[in-house]
């Protein structure tokens, strides 16, 4: 067999993942199988898999192999890395912040075609549809629009939503949160934004869209975090 370059291995594996040849039920082949197929070193295979993981396409799980994550809309465009950022960080982070969460809407709905195209959840499954206003220092600064797969994250209550759903997932459900894909955009403010946020003279909002997956590669969350753009910054430390 003709030797294959590292770039070729990555490109071939990525195409197989995106085309569905390696789907969520199949996982990736073992390292040994890939070494034999491509006639390369273990290092080359691991390098290609690491690149796929960095793009949010796969996730390595001890004892399970390399899990293929469910595909989301515009997967190839979700290239903005906000690694290790767990939420919105205030510009005035040195000040003491008074934080409060207000539940603006809480219901369980069935995913239809429109919601499917927005969130990538399968049509027909039940999801928790939640709107939460994050009030910081007496100012409605963030509107979280959450959708949680009720089959994967069951029995969410308004009380849980008012606290931390992620704590509930980690501690009560004992479920591993493996990967979060994020996309940061600036958008025109909608009527919903004007209703729930103290936008002032702003006519646009920042929107951090998140797709979250467990270590089985199953998407359990789609969230839009709408925030007043001149109130927040995002930081990332890149190590070489």
Image (cartoon, rainbow, N blue to C red):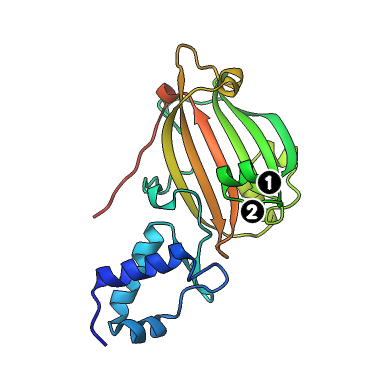
Which mark, by number, is residue 185?
Answer: none
55 and 85: which one is in front?
55
Answer above or below: position of 11 versus 163.
below
Which quadrant of the rendered structure holds the N terminus? Answer: bottom left
Q: Residue at x 42, y 38 (%)?
A: 184
Q: Which residue is the extreme one toward the top?
A: 201
Left or right: 88 as drawn, with respect to 147: left
Which mark, by number, is residue 122?
Answer: 2
Please indicate, yes or no, whether residue 87 appears anywhere in the rendered image: no
Disc 1 from disc 2: Cα separation: 7 Å
Q: Residue at x 71, y 52 (%)?
A: 125
Answer above or below: position of 181 versus 204.
below
* Residue, disc 1: 111
Q: Residue at x 63, y 59 (%)?
A: 175
Q: Quadrant of residue 236?
A: top left
Secondary structure type for disc 2: loop
Residue 90 image point, x, y percent: 44, 29
Secondary structure type for disc 1: loop
239 and 148: which one is in front?
148
Which quadrant of the rendered structure holds the C terminus? Answer: bottom left
Circle nearer the N terminus (1, 2): 1
Q: Are marks 1 and 2 in contact (CB under 8 Å)?
A: yes
Q: Quadrant of residue 230?
A: top left
Residue 78 image point, x, y percent: 41, 48
> Could you classify mark 1 by the number of other residues whose Cα lies within 10 Å: few (under 14), some (14-19), or many (20 or more)?
many
Residue 58 image point, x, y percent: 45, 64
Left or right: 95 as drawn, with respect to 151: left
Q: Residue at x 36, y 66 (%)?
A: 50
Please indicate, yes or no, whether residue 135 appears anywhere in the rendered image: yes
Q: Quadrant of residue 234?
A: top left
């Amino acid at each position: 067999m003709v030797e294959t370059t590292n770039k070729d291995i990555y490109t071939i594996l990525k195409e197989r993942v995106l085309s569905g040849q390696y789907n969520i039920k199949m996982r990736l082949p073992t390292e040994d199988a890939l070494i034999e197929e491509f006639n390369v070193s273990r290092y080359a295979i691991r390098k290609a898999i690491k690149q796929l993981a960095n793009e949010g396409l796969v996730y390595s799980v001890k004892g399970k192999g390399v899990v293929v994550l469910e595909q989301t809309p515009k997967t190839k465009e979700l290239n903005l890395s906000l690694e290790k950022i767990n939420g919105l960080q205030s510009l005035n982070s040195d000040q003491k912040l008074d934080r409060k969460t207000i539940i603006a809407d809480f219901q369980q709905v069935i995913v239809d075609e429109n919601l499917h195209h927005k969130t990538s959840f399968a049509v027909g499954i039940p999801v928790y549809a939640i709107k939460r206003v994050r009030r910081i220092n007496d100012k409605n600064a963030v509107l979280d629009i959450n959708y949680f797969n009720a089959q994967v994250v069951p029995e969410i209550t308004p009380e849980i939503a008012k606290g931390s759903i992620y704590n509930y997932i980690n501690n009560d459900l004992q479920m591993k949160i493996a990967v979060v894909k994020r996309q940061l955009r600036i958008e025109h403010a909608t009527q919903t934004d004007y209703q729930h946020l103290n936008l002032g003279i702003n006519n646009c909002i920042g929107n951090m869209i998140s797709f979250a997956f467990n270590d089985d590669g199953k998407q359990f969350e789609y969230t839009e975090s709408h925030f007043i753009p001149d109130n927040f910054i995002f930081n990332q430390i890149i190590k070489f």
